[in-house]
Image (cartoon, rainbow, N blue to C red):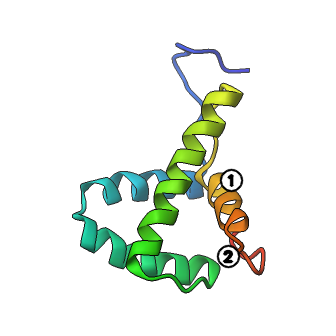
Amino acid sequence: MPQPGDPNPPRLSTEDAFLELLTDTLETMERPARGQFLERFFKSIAHVDLNEAQSLDIWEQVLARKREISESSGKKVALQAALVEVLAANNLLRLPILM
């Protein structure tokens, strides 16, 4: 089991690395552009129709949930887990195609 300070921390899966890069990139975007991207992102990954404002709100909920789960479990949680939880909690996840 990896320990903090290990010289070789565990590598992220390709999907997790992509979503981490996406998260970092979205942070650098202006809010309107981020909303436009997220509107299309949610449509493509979960077939969820949201407007820009709703997309931004859901994204903030996902990031907050990811932080919350990570802090309570003491380990880094994949963005997909928080994404599924938030979409399901908001009755937006009709089909489990996200995972």
Taking the image as drawn, is residue 76 in sight?
no
Image quadrant containing the N terminus: top right
Question: Which residue position is annotated with label 1?
Answer: 81
Q: Left of 39 or right of it: where is 12?
A: right
Identify which residue, 98 or 31, lies in the foreground.
31
The residue shown at (32%, 68%) is 34
Dot 1 amino acid type: Ala
Distance of label 2 from label 1 (alpha carbons): 15 Å
State the residue in front, 13 or 38.
Answer: 38
Helix, strand or loop for disc 2? loop
Question: Between residues 14 and 54, which one lies in front from this camera angle?
Answer: 54
Give percent across and percent down for residue 5.
Answer: 52, 13
Toward which corner of the image does residue 71 lie, by quadrant? top right
| Residue at position x 51%, y 17% in the image | 7
Q: Which residue is mark 2?
A: 92
Q: Residue furthest left?
A: 30
Corner quadrant of residue 46: bottom right
Out of 67 and 14, give the one closest to the viewer: 67
Mark toward the start of the polypeptide (2 vs 1): 1
Q: Secondary structure at mark 1?
A: helix
Q: Specify the quadrant of the image occupied by residue 69.
A: top right
62 to 37, vertically: above or below: above
- Label 2 with label 1: CB-CB less than 8 Å: no
User: Does 51 appear above or below 12?
Assistant: below
Q: Give the amino acid type for the residue marked by disc 2 in the picture.
A: Leu
Label 1 packing within 10 angstroms: few (<14), some (14-19), many (20+): some
- Residue 50 is left or right of residue 52, and the answer is right
Q: Is residue 85 visible?
A: yes
x 39%, y 78%: residue = 52
Above or below residue 16? Residue 58 is below
